[in-house]
Image: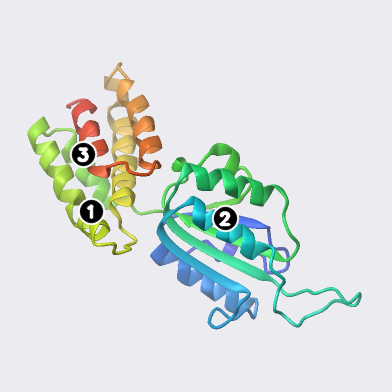
Amino acid sequence: MEILNNLDKNNLHHAYLIEGAQEEIVPEIFKFMKNLKIETSGNPDFCHINVDSFKIEDARNLKSMEYEKSFSLGHSSTGEATGKKIFLISANNFLLEAQNTLLKIFEEPIENTHFFIIIPDINILLKTLVSRFYLIRTKTELGNELKEAEKFITMPTRNRIDFIKELLAEAEEDEENLVIETSSARSKALKFLNALETILQSKFLKNYSDFTFFKHFFKVREFLNQPGSSAKSLMESVALITPNF
């Protein structure tokens, strides 16, 4: 994976935003921590936050932890602490209020404090927030999703609704039972939406003149980022508006 090629242990950026599958990226970050000689277990200066939806409370707690002094015993020749504080955050979604709080955190970087944020799709983040990061986009495989998207655009409406229901059923059941999964309903919805857009743009765009559905896709992404929204209802609206080929 190309993630390690984007990380320089001798010149760490304050904040990294990594787009891709967290089950693939997290182990790579742990390898990098090993290269930095930073313990990832039992180390108060290493914090791994893994949530489905990053809320305002999470952002406030993060801000408080950022200002706590490092427990590292390392010091420079001037007597200043040189220990690094690392925050690794894995989330499928960042609520708008939380993003606004993160903006304030990243406006004034604290020396020797570094953030690694992993998210499946950066399109759900504010552009102003994304601009604060060193961005790394991994090659996300959409092979199966692209095949399903090709079938989806040829389906009648009833079959599309059934497809969406089946796609999200397992993930929504996990959410109702408060089970945190990397493949949550929102994450699955975003991944399929990406594949659907790819198919419509690259294969059929030249044969269609009404692009209203692309605007609708953008709105769906925005609503998926709001608390209380239903991935199933939003994706059903996608099923209704997507043109049939």
Q: Which residue is drawn at 59% across and 56% down?
A: 16
Please state, as top left, top right, bottom left or bottom right, where the C terminus lies in the image. top left
* Residue 51: x %, y % from top left: 41, 61
- Inspect this view and state whether residue 138 appears: no
Report the residue that reaches farthest toward the right: 78
Res 150 label: 3
**Mark 1 vs mark 3, CA separation in Å:** 24 Å
Q: Which of 183 and 5 is in front in this view?
A: 183
Q: Which of 101 and 222 is in front in this view?
A: 101
- Please report contact status of discs 1 and 3: CB closer than 8 Å, yes or no: no
Q: Please state if 167 lies on the left or on the right of 28 as rendered.
A: left
Colouring rule applied to residues: rainbow
Packing grade of label 3 (10 A; few <14, some 14-19, many >=20) is some
Q: Name the residue under label 1.
A: 172
* Of marks 1 and 2, the one in the foreground: 2
**Mark 2 vs mark 3, CA separation in Å:** 42 Å
Q: Earlier in the sequence, mark 2 or mark 3?
A: 2
Packing grade of label 1 (10 A; few <14, some 14-19, many >=20) is many
Q: Which amino acid does label 3 sit on?
A: Glu
Q: Earlier in the sequence, mark 1 or mark 3?
A: 3
* Of marks 2 and 3, the one in the foreground: 2
Label 3: which secondary element? helix
Q: Name the residue under label 2.
A: 60
Rendered position, 178 above or below 34: above
Q: What residue type is labelled 2?
A: Arg
Label 2: which secondary element? helix
**Mark 1 vs mark 2, CA separation in Å:** 27 Å
* Residue 225: x %, y % from top left: 40, 42
Label 1: which secondary element? helix
Q: Please state if 173 lies on the left or on the right of 225 as rendered.
A: left
